Image (tube, rainbow, N blue to C red):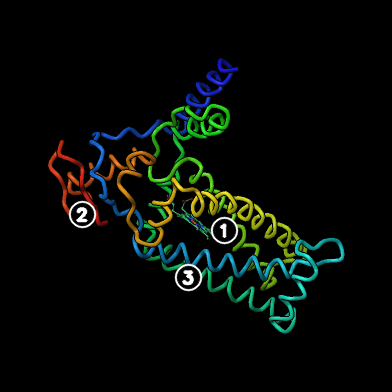
Amino acid sequence: MPATADRVERLLERVGRVLAPPAVPSRRFPPPRRGATLRKHDVAVIWLHWFNAVVWALELLTGGALIVTGRYHIAPAWFQELVVAVFGSRAHLLRFHVVVGVLWVAGMLPYAVFGFRRYVLGFFRNLRLDADDLVWLWRKARSLVSPSLPLPPQGAYNAGQKLFGWVVVAATLVIIATGFVTAFHLGPQWLVAWCVPLHFVAVAAVFAALFVHIYMAAFMPNERPAFFSMFTGRVDARYAYHHHAKWYHEVLDDCLAGRRTCDAPAPEGADADQTPRS
Ligand code: HEM
């Protein structure tokens, strides 16, 4: 069995190298001093993330109550009746769902228009899967039976977070397109009819992935520093050194090279207690 697992790993590594060779940090730094932090998310990203989370909560709640046909409904009848009662009628509920969806798009547009390089391209750069990521996914699955298996170093996001990110990006585009076609009847009847199940499937994909995302982010004790970073913007440097090593070395390298503004860039080889601000 280990021989087969190793062969699969070597195959994945080869496939990964074709996709993207593993990013190797140009310099390596010593572990940081206890208590040092690194800037990971800026305020605009934190706002967008929590705005997105609130919108998802509202849309799931109202959308779940809206999906009722003669053939299926996903939420129990009591839930649908309760939500419709809160809004007064199904028409009000639908209007609320559509208005929140339009506000969601309006809230994201400034990032796409005015911050395309920083937020859109920057996000896609962080989501790029390389050979280390494919091996990480394979070893993570294997670590269920062999917990001591070492994991390859990770960038700003680990491979699991990257997959989640891709699901969110793809599903968001489908949800927005199908949502607009359905809400404003943009197109022939057959297109509107197809957009309804497509909208639902895309939401279901994110909904399933969200269980893992929220569990990992909010309930896994060793992911606690990442959870706090989505409020403060800063992440514990020791956590970054152990869980996101490639990102840690890249940030410190950028810091010393002046590509990133740092609070206190340390000289090369010194105890790496840098706290980048950008
Ligand atoms: C209570 C709900 C949520 C919690 C506690 C939460 C927590 C977090 C945390 C802590 C991070 C930072 C990870 C890191 O820097 O290593 C993050 C990132 C992210 N979150 Fe959430 N999140 C929630 C809801 C959502 C929702 C609803 C979405 C979108 C559907 C979402 C999409 C993302 C994406 C795309 C990222 C960046 C990539 C990633 O870390 O997976 N989150 N979230």
**Is 195 placed left or right of 58 in the picture?**
right
Q: CA distance from mark 1 to mark 3?
A: 13 Å
Tell me the amino acid under the disc marked 1.
Answer: Thr
Measured from the top left, where is residue 216 in percent x and y? 51, 49
Residue count near mark 2 (Cα–Cα under 10 Å), binned few <14, some 14–19, many ≥20: some
Residue marked by disc 2: 261
| Residue drawn at (54%, 54%) of the image | 214
> Tag 3's secondary structure?
helix
Q: Residue furthest left?
A: 267
Tell me the amino acid under the disc marked 3.
Answer: Gly
Q: Residue furthest bottom?
A: 88
Residue marked by disc 1: 172
Quarter of the figure with the C terminus: bottom left
Tell me the amino acid under the disc marked 2.
Answer: Thr
Residue 76 lies in quadrant: bottom right
**Is 154 placed left or right of 265 in the picture?**
right
Q: Which mark is residue 107?
A: 3
**Is 182 placed left or right of 158 in the picture?**
right
> Tag 1's secondary structure?
helix
| Residue drawn at (49%, 52%) of the image | 217
